């Protein structure tokens, strides 16, 4: 999938929507700002979440950053590959470096998220 297929949050998460499931990760911009990722705490599969909930933390050589739930729903998967290779977030942030998947709650509106072009403008500001 291209970057044009993704949606973005103001807190630097990307979303790839596939039916009622959303894959979420840290944007390429954010991983670049953080530097080398050394640890990713994965969220609990089965957890019910609401927008703004803190789901995980990502630790880099520079800092620790929180990852927020962009939507309401249930965590359906966590990227276990990040346990042994958290650097996937650096090398393929918007692909193999995904962090978790969410089954969307009924009625969840995704129109509030930015397009790739809007996000590029957001990060220049």
Image (cartoon, grey):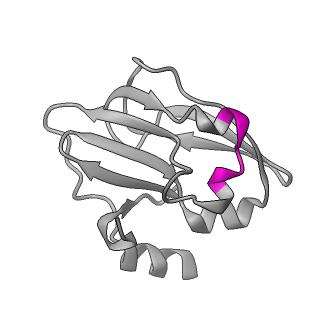
* Residue closer to the observer: 76 or 122: 76
**Side of 63 where 1 appears, left or right:** left
**Side of 19 where 32 appears, left or right:** right
Q: Is residue 63 above or below residue 122?
A: above
Residue 124 x %, y %? 56, 82
Q: Is residue 120 above or below residue 62?
A: below
Residue 107 x %, y %? 13, 37
Residue 23 x %, y %? 38, 45
* Extreme residue toward the right, this view: 61
Residue for point 22% across, 58% down: 111
**Numbered disc total:** 0
Residue for point 65% across, 61% down: 91
Instruction: Using the rendered image of the protein, determine whether residue 104 is visible from the camera's viewpoint.
Output: yes
* Extreme residue toward the top, this view: 46
> Dividing the picture into quarters, in which one does residue 112 lie?
bottom left
Does the magenta-highlighted stretch encompass residue 90?
A: no
Q: Which residues are magenta?
A: 83-89
Q: Quadrant of the C terminus?
A: bottom right
* Residue closer to the observer: 73 or 3: 3
Residue 87 x %, y %? 71, 51
**Side of 106 where 53 appears, left or right:** right
* Residue closer to the observer: 13 or 1: 1
Q: Quadrant of the N terminus?
A: bottom left
Does the magenta-highlighted stretch encompass residue 85?
A: yes
Residue for point 84% across, 54% down: 62
Instruction: Using the rendered image of the protein, determine whether residue 125 is visible from the camera's viewpoint.
Output: no
* Residue closer to the observer: 61 or 18: 18
Residue for point 65% across, 51% down: 88
């Amino acid at each position: 999938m291209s970057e044009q297929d993704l949606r973005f949050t103001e807190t630097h998460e990307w979303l790839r929507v596939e039916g009622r499931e959303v894959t979420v990760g840290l944007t390429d911009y954010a991983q670049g700002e953080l530097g080398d990722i050394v640890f990713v705490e994965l969220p609990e599969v089965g957890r019910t979440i609401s927008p703004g909930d803190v789901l995980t933390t990502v630790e880099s050589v520079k800092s620790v950053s929180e990852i927020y739930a962009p939507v309401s729903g249930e965590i359906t998967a966590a990227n276990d590959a990040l346990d042994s290779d958290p650097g996937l977030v650096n090398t393929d942030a918007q692909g193999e470096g995904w962090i978790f998947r969410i089954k969307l709650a009924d009625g969840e509106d995704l129109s509030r998220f930015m397009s790739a072009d809007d996000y590029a403008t957001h990060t220049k500001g």
